[in-house]
Image: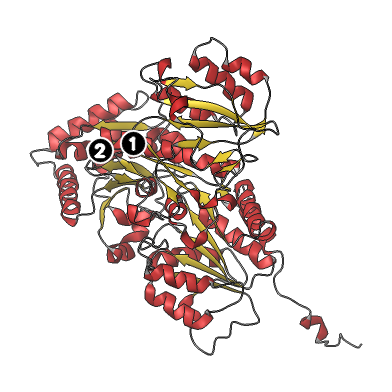
Amino acid sequence: MIGPKFNIDRFLSNGGAADQYERQLKRLTSAGKSVTCIEQAVRGALDSLDDKQGRSFVIYGEPQSGKTEMMICLTAKLLDTGRDMIVHLLNDSVDLLGQNLGRFKLSGLAPAARNFSEVLDPAVKLKGQKNVIFCKKNGGDLRKLLEKIGGWNGVVVIDDEADYASPNAKVNSGDKTKINSQITELIGFTGFYICVTATPARLDLNNTFDNDSNLWVDFPPHSKYTGQDTFFPIEGEIEYIRTLLPDAGDDPKYARQALFGFMVNAAYLNLYGHPNTEKNYSMLVHTSGKKVDHRSDWTVMNDTLNALVKKDSKNFPAYVEYIWKLANNRFNDADPDRITNFILGNITRHAIIILNSERDWKDNSSAATNPTSLFTIIIGGNIVSRGVTLDNLLSMFFTRDVKHRIQQDTYIQRARMFGSRGDYLSFFELTIPQTLYLDWHRCFVFHRLALSAIKEGLGSLVWLSDQRIAAAASSSIDRSTVDLDKGEMLFSLFDYDPAIESVLNDNADPFEKIERLSAKLGQGCFPDYLVKYIRRTSLSGSSTIGIHPVADISGYTDGPDINKQMITRKRGFFGKSQRVRFPNAVHHLMIVKNNAERARLLYKFEGSIQFIKNTIHDS
């Protein structure tokens, strides 16, 4: 019997793993995860790259909404479409790089992702094959990577947390920061730059790598995501436990009470929520960036826990009574004795983790992100504020109010409670000074209003700030292209219907009129959240709303200041003559139409809020 004969041609035609993207989607669906949102973002990115020939743009996704899996799938799609050098940039953290690199390798992506240090040896040849390389945004690491692959044709750079370190903080001095300059060199004249972040304002206002906001891609959160609508709702009931503290003082009793609340909730979940499966939970104590504050908060937590361990301590009776009463008041269906005994019987199963520095993070990150102790207390500031997912996080305690102006990107990234908290959301407790919560809430309202343009494909975004909240660090705002006082927001174009005027001219209450107008125009043209925002901030009643007559710009002269087709105007449409019609109005709304019977809603807030717009993409 003659066996099969060897034929080299059968193997020369093997081009390696194909359909990488479909394999990744199958991996996720097999694990019970929805891929609809990922597919939308990947389609949008490929559209911006291919059909629109974009060189630089942003993919925006909510904090902790699954951006890593989206980037794995995007990388797979880029490999399928022939890209042969994909570089992932991460913040300058060894552990963060290791976590993300590990997730990429576990995904089964081919070729396997490699750390930049694995390819530096001259014996490692990269040409003629596909490459996925990870590198920290560190000057030394980037320089070594550039020496290896600098000048590569068509490199695709995917920058995770792109608004951190990558923007040029020297944009107004004619110089470039080191990291910005190195990434510019990495992209070169033929490469592509994809920014991935939850907080893109700085990238837009800085014109980072000439990213085009007309090409930005929205990565919507998955169905189980709990984010700003849950923790900072514009209206409706709070679905979690929110404890607001006085703004003045740092009385240790508030930290103790937050700790007791955390332990009571963790005990209840283990006894009644999932009694057959014990779970470890964590509490994040978010301090200032000062190490002395970290130590102070550690002392309060440590002393309180020790007092519960030692039954002869002077504070033991008072602390136990507080725990018992809290359990009794919080859970009508539970036995407070049982909850209290569970806590006291397991009180030694606690861990306090201080994260002051990168060294702390490297040594303790695993125990912090995936708690290994029944009661895990994490104390940290900025180091836990970006790119960190804390599994089984049950409580957040903010120890101090912010005395200075806060930046939107910083505080949006600090929302570590966002994510998939649905199965225990009603037991999650946020303890925070009242003014800080209100600032944080307004920060997200501003953010949501600005980013509505991404979902509607409007480009040319408008960012909001006021005396307490800054849109981005002032040093990063490119003053040559950014308008600091335009003060208007535009929504999607629509076909003008004369029936709209009957709504505008009706004698109905302004609140009723904006509800009817929103229903008639639809979400893209007059979104619900804007209606809710107007209602929420119209404390003096309907007199604070100015609904203007339709403005017809068909007779305007075309020029560099105005685009009649798109209904945009660099200096805006709301002049003093329009605003004086409603002298008490805070919210101004006006529909502007052109000679093609297309129209757009304009909104202006008249108050202490500043609207900041990058005019570089205006036509």
Q: In the image shown, does 167 or 117 lie closer to the viewer?
A: 167
Q: In the image shown, does 227 or 346 lie closer to the viewer?
A: 227
- The amino acid type found where label 1 is placed reads Glu
Which mark is drawn over residue 57? Answer: none
Where residue 77 appears, as percent x and y from the top left, is: 65, 62
Q: Which residue is the site of mark 2?
A: 258
- Residue 114 visible here: no
Where residue 456 appears, as percent x and y from the top left, is: 59, 41
Query: At x 46% / y 21%, what residue is drawn?
Result: 546
Where residue 604 appears, as percent x and y from the top left, is: 46, 31
Where residue 25 appears, as percent x and y from the top left, is: 65, 55
Residue 310 in which image quadrant = top left
- Residue 564 visible here: yes
Vertical side of 78 occupied by 533: above or below: above
Quadrant where the image shows the N terminus = bottom right
Q: Which residue is the site of mark 1?
A: 429
Find the distance from the CA under tag 2 to the CA under tag 1: 8 Å
Vertical side of 532 occupied by 615: above or below: below
Query: At x 50% / y 45%, what residue is drawn?
Result: 461
